[in-house]
């Protein structure tokens, strides 16, 4: 029990540090985005709704039971059900990050993207951290239908892109989820930067080789 309490305390501090780092580098603005971690007992700590990720208070983060019941802290993010759906489908996920990072949002709005996999395999690091990125059809933020649409993809994908909204990325640890989200954003930026240029993405054989490692 004491170990769980100290883990929860550490996770609260980590969420605030990661939130501040993401916000301060312009990876999400205003009160957009939300972060959660899952503890060993299956309960979850989540950012509150309408909170700025740059100004989180560890004491005020919401604590939810594994079934989504709000146990303590401020009212959780309106995407709580979405985070919970990701955890249900991914038993090894320990954290989920959702941002409105500009370039990923821009890609989510492009008319002619491939909804099965929105970004090409431009770099090895992208393939290793993200892999593939399906587009989830548009639903309003906080809509249960949005969470269910994510749930439908989450078993096969740890990262998805919400149409006209932004990325949702899970990871074994909060750092894994953070770094994958950042790599997704950088690759979206590269993709837009390369628009109109002839490009040489990694070949299927190169992608396969990376996936096997
Ligand atoms: O886009 C939205 O409104 C939410 O997905 C979001 O990013 C912020 O919502 P809260 O976490 O409820 O503040
Ligand atoms: Zn959002």
Image (cartoon, rainbow, N blue to C red):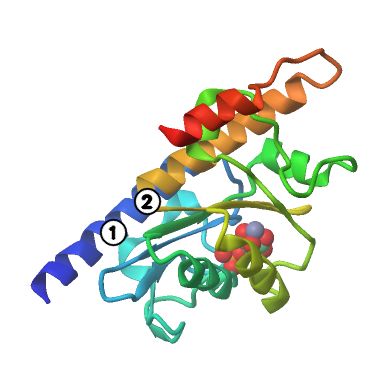
Residue 80 in the image, given as x and y percentages of width and height: 53, 72
What x and y, as percent, mark residue 193? 74, 20
The span from disc 1 to disc 2 (Cα, nearest Å) is 9 Å
Q: Earlier in the sequence, mark 1 or mark 2?
A: 1
Question: Residue drawn at (52%, 62%), measured in percent from left and top?
Answer: 51
* Residue count near mark 2 (Cα–Cα under 10 Å), binned few <14, some 14–19, many ≥20: many
Residue toward you, 201 or 42: 201
Q: Which residue in the protein does label 1 denote? A: 11
Task: From the viewer's perspective, tell me whether residue 91 is left or right of residue 129.
Answer: left
Which quarter of the rendered picture does the C terminus lie within? top left
SS state under label 1? helix
Quadrant where ligand 1 appears: bottom right
**Residue at image coords 57%, 57%:** 156
For image coordinates 34% across by 51% down, the residue present is 173
Q: Which quadrant of the structure image shows residue 185? A: top right
Label 1 neighbourhood size at 10 Å, few (<14), some (14-19), many (20+)?
many
The residue nearer to you, when weighing 23 against 161, is 161
Q: Looking at the image, do the residues carrying marks 1 and 2 touch, with CB atoms under 8 Å apart?
A: yes
Element class at badge 2: helix
The residue pinned by badge 2 equals: 174
Q: Position of residue 177 (x, y in %)?
A: 44, 48
**What is the quadrant of residue 149 in the picture?**
bottom right
């Amino acid at each position: 029990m004491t170990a769980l309490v100290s883990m929860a305390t550490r996770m609260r501090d980590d969420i605030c540090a990661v939130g501040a780092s993401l916000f301060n580098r312009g990876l999400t603005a205003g009160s957009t985005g939300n972060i959660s971690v899952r503890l060993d007992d299956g309960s979850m700590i989540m950012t509150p709704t309408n909170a700025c990720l740059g100004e989180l208070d560890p004491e005020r983060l919401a604590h939810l039971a594994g079934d989504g019941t709000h146990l303590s802290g401020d009212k959780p993010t309106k995407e709580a059900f979405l985070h919970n759906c990701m955890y249900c489908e991914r038993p090894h996920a320990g954290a989920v990050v959702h941002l409105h990072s500009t370039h990923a949002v821009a890609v989510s709005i492009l008319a002619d993207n491939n909804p099965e996999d929105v970004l090409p395999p431009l770099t090895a690091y992208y393939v290793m951290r993200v892999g593939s990125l399906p587009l989830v059809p548009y639903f309003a933020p906080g809509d249960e239908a949005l969470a269910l649409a994510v749930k439908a993809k989450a078993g096969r994908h740890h990262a998805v892109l919400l149409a006209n909204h932004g990325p949702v990325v899970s990871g074994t640890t909060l750092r894994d989820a953070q770094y994958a989200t950042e790599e997704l954003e950088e690759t979206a930026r590269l993709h837009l930067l390369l628009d109109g240029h002839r490009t040489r993405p990694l070949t299927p054989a190169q992608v396969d080789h990376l996936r096997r490692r």
